[in-house]
Image (spheres, helix red, strand yellow):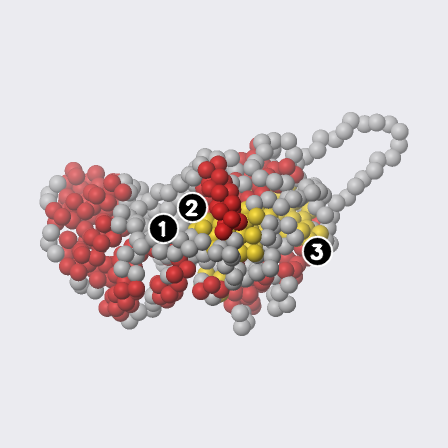
């Protein structure tokens, strides 16, 4: 039996009373697995699962049968795990274009209690540039670097994460807070050869389970009390409600996650049916760690754990496609989904969320909608959005993230746009040429003409296929919708430049810098315009600004060297 799952009570003999020993804070191991459905683990009933390590954790600790994330998006969900706040309160509403601000985190709280803190993450969505590194002595977000190239990949395998975490553990004897994040079950599914089979998603989970087993060997060899927390940021859809992957909807297929607690003082073999949120993990861990700053949320290890309302959201439909946001509010057996056409489900009787009760129970719908409004008002509705740099956008795209330019669209209910979402997901190639890309996105644009993402990708494909005049009209359509990034401005400027309209290109680039003052490509291109005009001082200033962007750093440095 793993040491981390046992509680030893020592009774001292003899009459002499000695001073009470100083009680050190326990070590804490937080394991988060990306995109992990609870129902793909053996301990949650999957007979096809190959998860012996996770199943042992469940038998030796407490398993929560109905745990939910407040958002089916990696960065936003992990921000909630580490702060105890829902996304409207911490401000991280998606990936890439958001960063956690200066709020207390589990790492800052545990470091203040004397724990050494280390994080080892396996996916680029959690890179330190997005703010989750606060409070960590070590934040290892290094991905593999392919031979012969000057960039890192967007993920690293579970075994590499586990080995890096083991090496860090080996040099520390005192209490620690270790966060290990395994990205493997996220798309694209490509398990190592030893774990391949007829289901690559289950194979990725099996690879994580094996890596976790090696990490727990090192963890269990340590002295002192400890707490182990195992969970996921969100689930994954395989066609349920027409969704593939995650982030489009807030149905339970992507909101329900596994949650297991084990270690000293944790009841063994207990299964909790009460619906709980992973937003309560920070408060639970902070309480177990002893005296120190508290964090928001409930103590999941309390003897009595009454039901409490749970909030969830996804802003991805609006941010990426110009459709409507979705918010959900769960009270007991009922769940409201706020959408242009609202949904109400009895999730106890209808866990698949197939029978919408909104029309049949208008009073319940009204009351729950009022409770949702009150929760949002109490949260303050923060938004930490900022312009995502081009490197972040590109690396997130390699993981399947849409990363649209944002802006106004149709405002449609996402459930009415499933076919458009399916076609966008399929239109990632491989394509024989850019003409094929143009044809694919023209067809999608006919289904959803205001869609800012579709219009941007069509404009980009037109530009790359040698049709700058058509690209200008399409980029202007994107800009009329009010995008939150400078990509469309840079694209429009490139189209103008190809048409010899340099003054208009310069104007487009400067407007792009109003949206994103740090956009390296806009600065670099302005440097090119200034250099062509003989304005070497102006060119130097823009090239120097472009040094701050990893995408343009090398090219800008080469231009500056040539100007000397």
User: Which is nearer the N-term, disc 1 or disc 3?
Assistant: 3
- 289 in relation to 388, above or below: above
- The residues bearing labels 3 and 2 have C-alpha atoms spaced at a distance of 35 Å
Horizontal and vertical percent position of residue 130: 42, 44
The reply to whether discs 3 and 2 touch (Cβ–Cβ < 8 Å) is: no
In this view of the protein, can residue 74 be seen by the observer?
A: no
Horizontal and vertical percent position of residue 419: 37, 65
Horizontal and vertical percent position of residue 416: 39, 61
Q: Which residue is mark 1?
A: 319
- 524 in relation to 441, above or below: above
Horizontal and vertical percent position of residue 73: 46, 52
**Drawn side of residue 93 relative to residue 518, left or right:** right
Quarter of the view holding residue 225: top right
User: Which is nearer the N-term, disc 2 or disc 1?
Assistant: 2
Q: Which residue is mark 2?
A: 93
Neighbor class of circle 2 (other Cα within 10 Å; few <14, some 14-19, many 20+) is many
Q: Nearer the viewer, mark 1 or mark 3?
A: 1
For the C terminus, give its image quadrant: top left
Neighbor class of circle 3 (other Cα within 10 Å; few <14, some 14-19, many 20+) is some
SS at badge 1 = helix
The reply to whether discs 2 and 1 touch (Cβ–Cβ < 8 Å) is: yes
The reply to whether discs 1 and 3 touch (Cβ–Cβ < 8 Å) is: no
Residue at 25% in and 68% down? 439
Work out whether residue 456 or residue 314 is closer to the camera in this orientation and state it. Answer: 314
Work out whether residue 549 or residue 344 is closer to the camera in this orientation and state it. Answer: 344
SS at badge 3 = helix
**Drawn side of residue 337 relative to residue 562, left or right:** right
Q: Which residue is mark 3?
A: 59
Residue at 57% in and 60% down? 351
Q: Which label number is shown at residue 60?
A: none
């Amino acid at each position: 039996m793993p040491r981390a799952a046992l509680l030893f009570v020592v009774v001292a003999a003899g009459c002499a009373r000695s001073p009470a020993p100083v009680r050190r804070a326990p070590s804490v191991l937080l394991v988060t697995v990306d995109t992990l459905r609870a129902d793909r683990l053996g301990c949650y009933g999957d007979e096809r699962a190959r998860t012996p390590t996770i199943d042992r954790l469940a038998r030796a600790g407490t398993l929560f049968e109905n745990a939910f994330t407040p958002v089916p998006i990696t960065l936003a969900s992990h921000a909630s795990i580490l702060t105890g706040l829902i996304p409207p309160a911490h401000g991280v509403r998606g990936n890439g274009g958001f960063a956690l601000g200066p709020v207390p985190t589990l790492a800052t709280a545990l470091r203040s209690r004397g724990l050494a803190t280390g994080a080892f993450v396996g996916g680029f969505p959690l890179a330190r540039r997005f703010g989750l590194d606060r409070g960590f002595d070590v934040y290892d977000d290094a991905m593999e670097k392919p031979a012969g190239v000057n960039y890192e990949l967007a993920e690293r395998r579970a075994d590499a994460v586990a080995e890096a975490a083991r090496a860090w553990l080996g040099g520390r004897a005192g209490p620690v807070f270790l966060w290990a994040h395994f990205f493997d079950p996220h798309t694209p599914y490509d398990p190592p050869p030893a774990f391949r089979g007829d289901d690559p998603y289950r194979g990725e989970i099996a690879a994580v389970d094996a890596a976790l087993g090696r990490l727990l060997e090192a963890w269990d060899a340590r002295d002192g009390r400890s707490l182990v927390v195992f969970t996921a940021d969100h689930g994954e859809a395989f066609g349920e409600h027409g969704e593939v992957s995650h982030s489009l909807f807030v149905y339970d297929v992507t909101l329900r996650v596994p949650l297991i607690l084990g270690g000293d003082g944790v009841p063994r073999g207990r299964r909790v049916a009460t619906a709980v949120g992973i937003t309560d993990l920070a408060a639970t861990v902070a309480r177990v760690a002893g005296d120190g700053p508290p964090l928001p949320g409930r103590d999941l290890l309390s003897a009595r754990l009454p039901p409490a309302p749970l909030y969830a959201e996804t802003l991805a439909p609006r941010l990426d496609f110009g459709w409507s946001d979705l918010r959900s509010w769960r009270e007991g057996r009922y769940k409201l989904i706020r959408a242009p056409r609202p949904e109400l489900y009895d999730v106890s009787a209808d866990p698949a969320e197939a029978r919408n009760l909104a029309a049949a129970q208008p009073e319940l719908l009204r009351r729950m909608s009022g409770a949702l409004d009150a929760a949002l008002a109490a949260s303050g509705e923060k938004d930490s959005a900022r312009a995502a740099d081009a490197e972040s956008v590109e690396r997130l795209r390699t993981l399947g993230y849409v990363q649209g330019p944002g802006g106004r669209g149709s405002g449609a209910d996402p459930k009415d746009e499933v076919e458009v979402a399916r076609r966008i997901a399929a239109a990632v190639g491989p394509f024989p040429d850019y003409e094929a890309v143009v044809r694919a996105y023209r067809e999608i644009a006919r289904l959803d003409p205001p869609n800012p993402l579709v219009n941007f990708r069509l404009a980009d494909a037109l530009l790359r296929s040698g049709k700058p005049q058509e690209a200008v009209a399409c980029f202007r359509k994107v800009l009329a919708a009010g995008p939150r990034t400078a990509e469309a401005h840079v694209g429009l400027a490139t189209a103008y430049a190809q048409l010899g309209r340099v003054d208009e290109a310069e104007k487009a680039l400067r407007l792009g810098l109003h949206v994103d003052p740090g956009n390296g490509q806009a600065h670099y291109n302005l440097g090119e315009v200034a250099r062509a005009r003989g304005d070497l001082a102006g060119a130097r200033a823009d090239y120097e600004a472009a040094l701050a962007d990893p995408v343009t750093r090398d090219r800008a440095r080469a231009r500056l060297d040539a100007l000397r």
